[in-house]
Amino acid sequence: MSQTPSPDATGATPSPSQDAYLDVPESAGAWIVRLLKGIAIGIGFILPGLSGGVLAVIFKVYDPMIRFLANLRHRFWANVRYFIPIGIGGVIGVVLFSIVVAAAFGRYEAAFVTLFIGFVIGTFPSLWRQAGKQGRSTKDWIILAVAAVAIFAIMLVGGQSDLSVTPNIGVWLGSGALIGLGVIVPGMSPSNFLIYFGLYDKMAAGIKDFDPGVFLPLFVGLVLCVLLFAKGADWAFAHHYSAMYHFILGMVVGSSLAIFPTVVFTQAAIDKSGLSLPVFLLSCAVMLALGVLASWAFSKVEDRYSGEREAIDAGGR
């Protein structure tokens, strides 16, 4: 039985339709789909160039997540049950990909990045439709363009930097907060900044080895950042839905384009691969295509559980 709605972060009572995803009958298939979403989102947290927040938006769990974090007391246990497979999947994605990073990411960095960029490209139409639910004004187009150019320029300049920070507990707390911003601000790729500061490979190795001196401050920093800014994000989406989603869309476009000159098509990436330039370009093209096909196949699996998807759509702002 549904609980009596309580005021959300904006002071208003949540509409029953916003909680509809919690009332959809649970099934093993839907649980597994959310687990797979969590794995992909977890990988997005630590894969250079990607954003776990963007994947959360694309998989339609971002809005419910922000509403839950902004008002933890509202239907707490129902939300916990809903997000358990997503949380488990997120941990699996982070740990497994950290192992992959530590073992082989250096040589196959470009291949992995293009694979996941293909994944983002394949799901872009869904994000585009979601952004335009309430129409598109001239202001929305301007926001999209400015966000795309700004994040492209920031990543391009940052990609040419060669900074190095000595890791310690404070640094890992800050790194966790940076990853938390990637949750709150879809389109931001914390891993790129960690690479710029020379912390990415050390973070991956620490997670792989279950080093508490690494993963504990990372986790604390992430949680504190998300809880601190969740109410602000919830308010922004409640009052400026179209502008916020077009801002996200611009971040996705700009960051995706910036990945190619800053991460993929660099001399360092080509040298690491050990491949000739034509073979390197071909391998990147193949991985990009596989990513697009994988995202298309995943959307087909998700559509089998359209009851859940339609409920989330009905809860849109």
Image (spheres, rainbow, N blue to C red):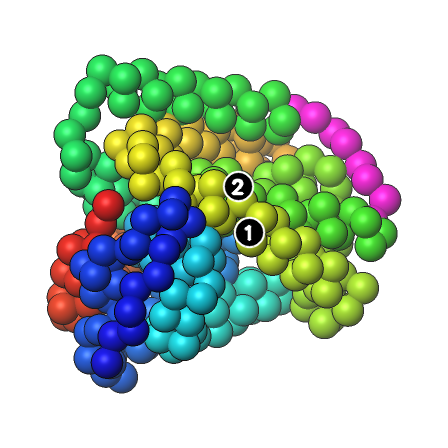
Q: Which residue is mark 2?
A: 189
Residue 24 is one of the magenta-drawn residues: no
Q: Choose top left, top right, bottom left or bottom right for residue 272.
A: top right
Q: Left or right of 273: which side holds 27?
A: left
Q: Earlier in the sequence, mark 1 or mark 2?
A: 2
In the image, which residues are magenta? 160-167
- Callout 1: SS: helix
Q: Nearer the viewer, residue 285 or 25?
A: 25
Quarter location, residue 77: bottom left
Question: Which residue is disc 1 drawn over?
Answer: 226
Residue 147, visible in the rendered structure: yes
- In the displayed structure, would residue 13 be above or below residue 155? below
Q: Provide the secondary structure element on which disc 2 rests.
A: loop
Residue visible at 60% across and 57% down in the picture: 223
Residue at 17% over, 34% down: 134
Specify whether 271 is left or right of 130. right
Dot 1, how many residues are within 10 Å of its Cα: few (below 14), some (14-19), or many (20+)?
many
Q: Residue at x 49, y 48 (%)?
A: 230
Residue 293 percent coordinates (x, y): 25, 54
Mark seen at residue 90: none
* Observer able to see residue 290: no
Considering the whole magenta stretch, tell me its main secondary structure: loop
Q: Nearer the viewer, residue 3 or 167?
A: 3
Q: Quadrant of the C terminus?
A: top left
Q: Position of residue 146 (x, y in %)?
A: 40, 18
Report the amino acid beneath label 1.
Answer: Val
Q: Label 1, label 2: how many angstroms apart (C-alpha)?
A: 15 Å
Q: Residue at x 68, y 59 (%)?
A: 220
Q: Callout 2, which amino acid?
A: Ser
Which quadrant is home to the N terminus? bottom left
Of the pair 132 and 281, the residue shown nearer to us: 132
Q: Is residue 161 magenta?
A: yes
